Image: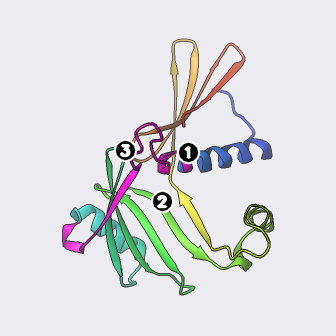
Amino acid sequence: MRARRVAPAALALCAMASVAFWLATRAGDVATKKPAETERRVTAADLPAAARTALEKLAGGKTITAFAEEVEYGHTFYEGSWSGESGKNVDALVTASGDLVEIEERVDEGHVPSAVLAAARAAAGRETEVEFEKKTMVLYEAKFHKGDRAHEVLLTPDARRVEEETEDAGEEHEEQNE
């Protein structure tokens, strides 16, 4: 398999695809008006042992102040919340088997990249108060050859496809699933 250099534009495209995927997985089903997700507060005892252990490890000894069970498109996830090093709230989302899906951390405006701050101000208006969360999502890239084609598939921890690229005889094709 040939080596590829990742250009800044490709990194930006990947970041945009991640954000688009995140938005798509949280949007409601417009046709049926059903919510895309449900969330309910639970206790630590309600979590599968692997999920609870993963959240406790992520919290790094901090007290987890709230637990939740979230269902998104038929997939069940577990969330834990605690106060981070900065004193701001941190939420982590894991699968029942303890695989990390995402981390959300509230951040002050001073810790937000200037381009993000400018875009948020443009969208919200200068006089509107804006709160920020830094989201870290986990995605896995699977690479394989099938026949004469090379494939790269980007997947979430619960196996939803985010993007797929195929390449054959010097051509590259990219599909983004939303």
Q: Position of residue 35 (x, y in %)?
A: 40, 50
Q: Residue at x 41, y 78 (%)?
A: 60
Labels 1 and 2: the sequence-earlier one: 1
Q: Residue at x 44, y 42 (%)?
A: 29
Image disc number at residue 73: 3
Query: What kind of colouring is applied to the model shown?
Result: rainbow
Query: Residue 99, image x and y in percent?
Result: 37, 56
Looking at the picture, which amino acid does disc 2 mark? Glu
Would residue 61 appear left or right of 86 to someone viewing this image? left
Please say if 29 is above or below 48.
above
Q: Residue furthest bottom?
A: 87
Label 3, label 2: how far apart the Cα atoms are: 16 Å
Cα–Cα gap, marks 1 and 2: 13 Å
Q: Position of residue 8 (x, y in %)?
A: 79, 47
Q: Which of the two discs, 3 and 1, sits closer to the camera?
A: 3
Q: Which residue is mark 1?
A: 21
Q: Position of residue 62 (x, y in %)?
A: 40, 84
Residue under pointer 2: 102
For the N terminus, the quadrant is: top right
Q: Which residues are magenta?
A: 23-46
